[in-house]
Image (cartoon, grey):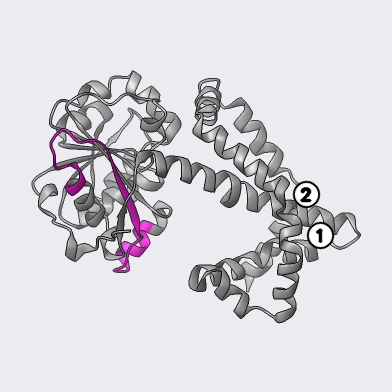
Amino acid sequence: MKLWRDGDIDPQPLQGKKIAVIGYGAQGHAHALNLRDQGHDVVVGLREGSASAAKAQAAGLSTLPVIDAAQSADIVAMLLPDEQMAPAWADGLGQALTPGKTLLFAHGLAMHFGVIAAPPQVDVVMVAPKGPGARLRADFVAGSGLPAIFAVHQDCSGAAPALARAYASAIGCGRIGVIETTFKEECECDLFGEQAVLCGGIPDLMRAGFETLVAAGFSPEMAYFECVFEAKAVVDLIYARGIAGMYTAISNTAEFGAYRSGSRIIDEHVRAAMRQTLADIQSGAFAQAWTGDAARGFTAFSAARALRADSAIETPGRAIRALVEKD
């Protein structure tokens, strides 16, 4: 694995280039502000009537309608949510990407699964910071950064990899390190990690543990403490020391119990379900389901969100968070 840091990255490919950041949400605001603070010419592209326009302008950024912003720029950073990319393309955004421009993404789904089609004679790259936009911005302001990965989907100029690295450096990621991947690898690994582990697997494991304890007669508050609240301490240890290092930082009792019961919970049935989840992602079935639900007004998505928001685990969670916040 080759790691690029600021000292290894030539900033020249970004010099004199105007950058249109399309969208001012989680990633968009951080990219736009970090680029601006590094001295780059940035304009934020927003749909007519967007509530984000006032926020961007208050931060000292120029705003334009999406198509106008893309037409005015050399680099168009598509930082809209995945489900908004196809409608933006249908509104004519793709036609604003004339030969010689660079189209940049922070996630590979739209390109990898053909949600939108890249125009010919434009470079298509990805720079994906490994963390949320709020963290990207906070770390940048503090003089640090997040690691990032970059990829090239289409290199018409012959300079797309160098430009992607320069962009990663400009948003602060070169302070920590930048590594190269592909749109396929980033997209499929990212979706799998979110679904099977980070945002799907872990919360459902927490809910199952909570429900098991409550059904056995334990109080919801104690169940929440043991299955949810303490997770941050464990994750922080893993983040700082790795999984093996986490084991050395907990009690011998907890470590022995982890070895004895972890594989009992995460058994071959779970691993088979993980393989099926990955297959669902790689086949395009997930992307098709997601874009289809978006086109229908998010019916399945909204129902799933409402069901989980009404879960029994949320009541003690709110009470415990309120108690801790007072302290």
- In the image, residue 19 lies at what x, y percent? 19, 41
Return the mark for residue 220. Answer: 1
Q: Residues within 10 Å of mark 1 (few under 14, many from 20)?
A: many
Q: Amino acid at mark 2?
A: Ala
Placement of 71 over or under 321, stated as above or below: above
**Secondary element type, mark 2:** loop
> Are the residues at dot 2 and dot 1 in contact (C-beta closer than 8 Å)?
yes
Left or right of 69: which side holds 294?
right
Q: Is residue 35 magenta?
A: no
Nearer the N terminus, badge 2 or badge 1?
1
Q: Amino acid at mark 1?
A: Pro
Whole-number angstrom distance, CA of label 2 to CA of label 1: 9 Å
Q: Which residue is mark 2?
A: 312
Q: Please give the range of residues in magenta.
A: 136-162
Q: Is residue 157 magenta?
A: yes
Question: What residue sits 43% from the left and 53% below the top?
Answer: 132
Quadrant of image for the N terminus: bottom left
